[in-house]
Image: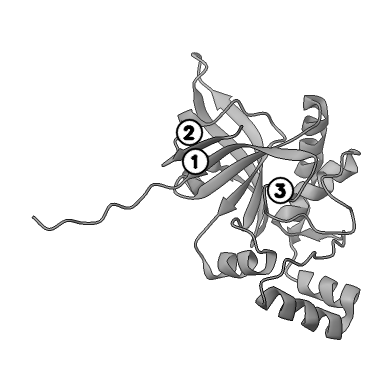
């Protein structure tokens, strides 16, 4: 069973492997829209790329790869997301397969963020059906979005496509992976972390 920790620290993370990934809940207008569309608690996905420990085996930093507005970029998990809610995911595959998928993900470093993904939905469904799907979403229904592989990627495509490329698809290739711990039947959460609670100021 996945560990759940409030006010999580780097030292509390489980033993990670390159090729794991995380779903993150952030606090922006764009993240609210993504959660609304996907009906998911989380709104962002990123790769666990490098696990750095000191000589005593203590975790020092976790390098990540993520698709953000400026394109596919490297970063540091703790520096960027220490106050965010997070779930670490692991595919039910051998370590070597996860490593191969990560190596494929590095190739996305030349790709830009897919700002035109709404057009993929319209091309797949047509204007009328896309509008009907939006009505379903407004009513609280969860809708599957089409996945179209092209020269740009959103965050979940940056996870989904490399795994599919090494022969271990996380979901049906026709549908976009959702930022939801249970959107894939071949992956599982191994850690839940929740941002620190803000204590109310008490007057003396």
Query: Which label sits on residue 10?
Result: 2
Q: What is the total number of numbered labels drawn onto the structure image?
A: 3
Quadrant of the snapshot with the C terminus: bottom left
Please indicate whether residue 69 sits to the left or right of residue 92 in the image.
left
Image spot of residue 185 (x, y percent): 79, 43
- In x, y percent, where is residue 1? 61, 32
Compute the Cα span from label 3 to label 1: 24 Å
Say if 67 sits above or below 164 in the image.
below
Instruction: Answer left or right for 189 relative to 78.
Output: right
Residue 99 on image: x %, y %: 77, 31
Q: Nearer the viewer, mark 3 or mark 2?
A: 3
Closest to the observer: 57 or 175?
175
> Does residue 108 appear in this view?
no
The reply to whether the C-beta atoms of the residues labelled 3 and 2 are less than 8 Å apart is: no
Cβ atoms under marks 2 and 1 closer than 8 Å: yes
Residue 202 numbered tag: none
Position in image of residue 132 (x %, y %)? 79, 81
* Secondary element type, mark 3: loop
The Cα atoms of the two marked residues, 2 and 1, are separated by: 7 Å
- 10 Å crowding of disc 1: few (<14), some (14-19), many (20+): some
Hey, which quadrant is residue 74 in on the image?
Answer: top right
Nearest to N terminus: mark 3 or mark 2? 2
Tag shown at residue 182: 3
Label 2 SS: helix
Residue depicted at x 68% and y 54%:
179
Task: Looking at the picture, tell me which residue is in the foreground, 179 or 82.
Answer: 179
Outermost residue toward the bottom in this view: 128
Residue highlighted by disc 1: 78
Of the two numbered discs 2 and 1 on the same chain, state the one appearing first in sequence: 2
Measured in 3D between alpha carbons, the distance from the residue under mark 3 to the one under mark 2, in whole angstroms, is: 24 Å
SS of the residue at dot 1? helix
């Amino acid at each position: 069973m996945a560990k759940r920790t409030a006010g999580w620290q780097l030292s509390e993370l489980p033993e990670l492997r390159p090729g794991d990934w995380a779903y993150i809940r952030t606090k922006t207008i764009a993240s609210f829209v993504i959660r609304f569309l996907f009906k998911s608690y989380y709104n962002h996905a990123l790769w666990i790329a490098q696990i750095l420990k000191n000589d005593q085996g203590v975790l020092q930093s976790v390098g990540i790869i993520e698709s953000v507005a400026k394109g596919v970029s490297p970063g540091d998990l703790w520096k960027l997301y220490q106050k965010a809610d997070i779930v670490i995911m692991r595919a039910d595959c051998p370590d070597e397969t996860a490593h191969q998928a990560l190596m494929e993900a590095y190739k996305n470093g030349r790709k830009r963020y897919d700002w035109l993904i709404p057009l993929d939905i319209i091309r797949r469904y047509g204007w009328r059906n896309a509008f009907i799907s939006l009505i379903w979403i407004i009513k609280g229904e969860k809708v599957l979005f089409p996945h179209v592989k092209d020269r740009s990627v959103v965050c979940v495509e940056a996870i989904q496509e490399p795994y599919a490329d090494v022969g271990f698809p996380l979901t049906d290739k026709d549908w976009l992976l959702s930022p939801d711990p249970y959107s894939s039947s071949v992956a599982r959460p191994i850690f839940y972390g929740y941002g620190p609670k803000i204590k109310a100021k008490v007057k003396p």
